[in-house]
Image (cartoon, rainbow, N blue to C red):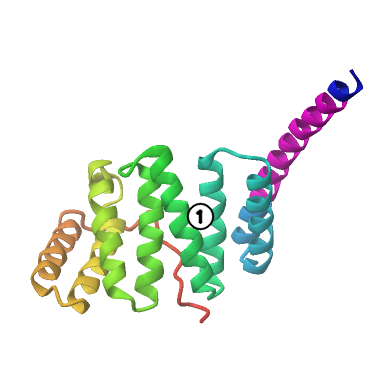
């Protein structure tokens, strides 16, 4: 009887710890976002790291772990820790594909982030691979109408990546499409302007 009580107690404590970990993960996540908003990337990194540790310890859903890895990966990249950023972003992408599928809007965010990380490091062949997967997804989601200039900007980078990877013909096609988007949306500005990975390195 005593043994059963002890086991039940450990199970209860484990469930309590899991809930606490998840709660802590959310708090650290919000603190990380605030620090990033304030431009304090070092503090953001510490908070996003703690968010990820607690998300994993609390057996958070894969979507939550993907988000934690994504945010920590971005910040590490902004701090020029490119290898660590790459590993986190790749794992975040893998998890997100499992959760929301290969063509979801959230998956496209993971793909674009990797594309920009590689582009800003001059790894154009890898950048082209991720742009080629991300751009068709957001087109299906209607970004050509909702944020055409941001799409054109991404396509410009895709074009450069293709050109520097030796695919001049495809690069020209993509560049023409980006130019058409700008021509068809005179005076429009990009609603989404990403943070770059090469500004502090």
Which part of the image, by quadrant, shows the N terminus? top right
Mark 1 nearby-residue class (10 Å; few <14, some 14–19, many ≥20): many
Q: Is residue 52 above or below residue 195?
A: above
Magenta stretch holds residue 15: yes
Residue range corresponding to the magenta coloring: 6-30
Question: Toward the viewer: 126 or 183?
Answer: 126
Question: Toward the viewer: 167 or 98?
Answer: 98
Helix, strand or loop for the magenta stretch, by majority: helix
| Secondary element at image label 1 | helix
* Residue drawn at (56%, 64%) of the image: 75
Q: How many marks?
A: 1
Magenta stretch holds residue 163: no
* Residue drawn at (87%, 22%) of the image: 5
Considering every residue shown, the one lying at the far top of the view is 1
Q: Is residue 141 above or below residue 201?
A: above
For this view, does 15 lie left or right of residue 155?
right
Q: Is residue 15 visible?
A: yes
């Amino acid at each position: 009887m005593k043994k059963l009580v002890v086991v039940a107690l450990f199970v209860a404590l484990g469930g309590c710890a899991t809930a606490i970990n998840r709660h802590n993960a959310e708090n650290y996540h919000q603190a990380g976002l605030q620090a990033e908003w304030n431009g304090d990337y070092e503090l953001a990194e510490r908070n996003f790291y703690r968010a990820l540790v607690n998300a994993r310890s609390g057996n958070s859903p894969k979507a939550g772990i993907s988000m934690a890895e994504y945010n920590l990966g971005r910040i590490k990249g902004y701090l020029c820790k490119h290898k660590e950023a790459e590993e986190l972003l790749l794992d975040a992408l893998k998890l997100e594909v499992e959760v929301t599928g290969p063509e979801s809007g959230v998956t496209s965010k993971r793909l674009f982030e990797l594309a920009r990380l590689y582009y800003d490091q001059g790894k154009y062949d890898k950048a082209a691979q991720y742009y080629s997967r991300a751009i068709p997804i957001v087109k299906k989601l209607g970004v050509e109408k909702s944020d055409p200039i941001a799409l054109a900007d991404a396509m410009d980078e895709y074009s450069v990546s293709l050109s520097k990877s030796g695919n001049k013909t495809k690069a020209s096609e993509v560049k023409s499409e980006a130019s058409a988007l700008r021509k068809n949306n005179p005076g429009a500005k990009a609603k989404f302007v990403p943070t770059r990975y090469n500004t502090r390195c």
